[in-house]
Image: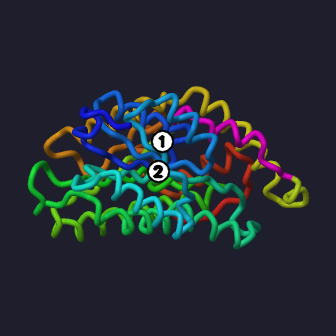
């Protein structure tokens, strides 16, 4: 049963809170006094987080690609809010589909784009009527925070599907921000670099058998060896949660934040080095071979 304090707390919806960055975002928002509606895909995760987070957390069970389930969740949130409105939406849910673009099944590429890009727009459209607009009395307009990635600025080999989805999130967010000006709703992007989350350890379980005869086999092995070590040395995900709290609290947040270990290296690669120079560095590090001309 809701307490009066929880009812009066500003409410924010966060997708994908079962672990990693989304979990840290939900945790930090609750600590800062917000009421959080957080999506998970499994009922056991909903029960676990309800116990862990307490009454300030309301679980929503849906997959972001399931339109009917998203609509049901929106109806539940609307009923729970009553006459109140959401103060914010954080689109965090996502996956990473690795593999060489020329050999990856198109179904896997479509799955990557559907989860990481199409669903961002789908969730935003579904919950937008529940956001507080500029015309609403009693409080500042809502903000939408889209969790992208430095992969939206810099694309590594064998992470092409993920990079494509995050480049899409960057473009979608810019257009959405400008269109939402008519409602007074702001859109902010966070580009995490290397963050210490379970997604890095999952790379160790990647099945290389479909690529046993591929020219990419050895370079992929090198890539998969690097990724878990990078993740273990990454920035704690709590930093992302703290940043999200800051974005909702400050009067005028920046349009885009890049955060996490390795962000300086990404900046150098995208601003100071030529693309061909970066190609040669990656080719040497991963054993990709070949050399293309030009700059």
What residue do we see at 46% from left, 50% from top? 15
Residue in the foreground of this view, choosing between 105 and 271: 105
The circle drawn on residue 15 is 2
Marks 1/2: CA–CA distance: 7 Å
Quadrant of the image for the N terminus?
A: top left
Question: Picture coordinates of residue 184 (x, y %)?
Answer: 16, 61
| Contact (Cβ within 8 Å) of mark 1 with mark 2 | yes
Mark 1 or mark 2: whose residue is earlier in sequence: 2
Residue in the foreground of this view, choosing between 63 and 179: 63
Question: Picture coordinates of residue 144 (x, y %)?
Answer: 31, 54
What residue would you read off at disc 1? 22
Report the colour scheme.
rainbow
Report the magenta residues as a range.
195-208
Toward which corner of the image does residue 107 lie, by quadrant?
Answer: bottom right
Question: Picture coordinates of residue 174 (x, y %)?
Answer: 31, 64
Q: Secondary structure at mark 1?
A: helix
How dense is the environment of label 2, judged by Cα within 10 Å: few (below 14), some, or many (20 and up)?
Answer: many
Residue 191 versus residue 127 in the image, above or below: above
How dense is the environment of label 1, judged by Cα within 10 Å: few (below 14), some, or many (20 and up)?
Answer: many
Asked if residue 203 is among those painted magenta in the image, a careful observer would answer: yes
Q: Residue 79 vs residue 64: left or right?
A: left
Question: Picture coordinates of residue 240 (x, y %)?
Answer: 40, 36
């Amino acid at each position: 049963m809701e307490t009066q304090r929880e009812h009066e707390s500003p409410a924010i919806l966060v997708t994908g809170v079962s672990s990693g960055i989304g979990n840290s975002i939900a945790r930090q928002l609750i600590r800062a006094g917000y009421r959080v509606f957080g999506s998970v895909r499994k009922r056991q995760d909903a029960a676990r987080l309800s116990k862990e987070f307490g009454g300030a957390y309301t679980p929503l069970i849906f997959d972001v690609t399931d339109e009917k389930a998203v609509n049901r969740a929106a109806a539940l949130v609307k009923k729970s809010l009553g006459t109140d409105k959401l103060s914010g939406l954080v689109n965090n849910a996502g996956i990473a589909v690795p593999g060489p673009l020329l050999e990856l099944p198109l179904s896997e590429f479509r799955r990557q784009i559907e989860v990481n890009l199409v669903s961002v727009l789908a969730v935003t459209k579904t919950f937008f009527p529940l956001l507080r607009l500029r015309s609403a009395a009693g409080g500042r307009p809502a903000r939408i925070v889209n969790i992208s990635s430095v992969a939206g600025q810099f694309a590594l080999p064998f992470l092409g599907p993920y990079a494509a989805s995050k480049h899409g999130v960057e473009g979608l967010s810019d257009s959405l921000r400008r269109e939402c000006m008519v409602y007074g709703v702001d859109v902010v992007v966070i580009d995490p670099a290397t963050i210490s989350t379970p997604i890095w350890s999952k790379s160790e379980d990647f099945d290389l058998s479909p690529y046993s005869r591929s020219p990419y086999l050895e370079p992929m092995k090198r890539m998969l060896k690097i990724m878990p070590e990078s993740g273990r040395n990454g920035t704690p995900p709590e930093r992302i949660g703290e940043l999200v709290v800051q974005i909702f609290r400050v009067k005028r947040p920046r349009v885009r934040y890049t955060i996490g270990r390795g962000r300086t290296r990404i900046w150098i690669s995208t601003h100071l080095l030529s693309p061909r120079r970066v190609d040669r560095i990656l080719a040497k590090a991963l054993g990709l071979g070949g050399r293309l001309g030009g700059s």
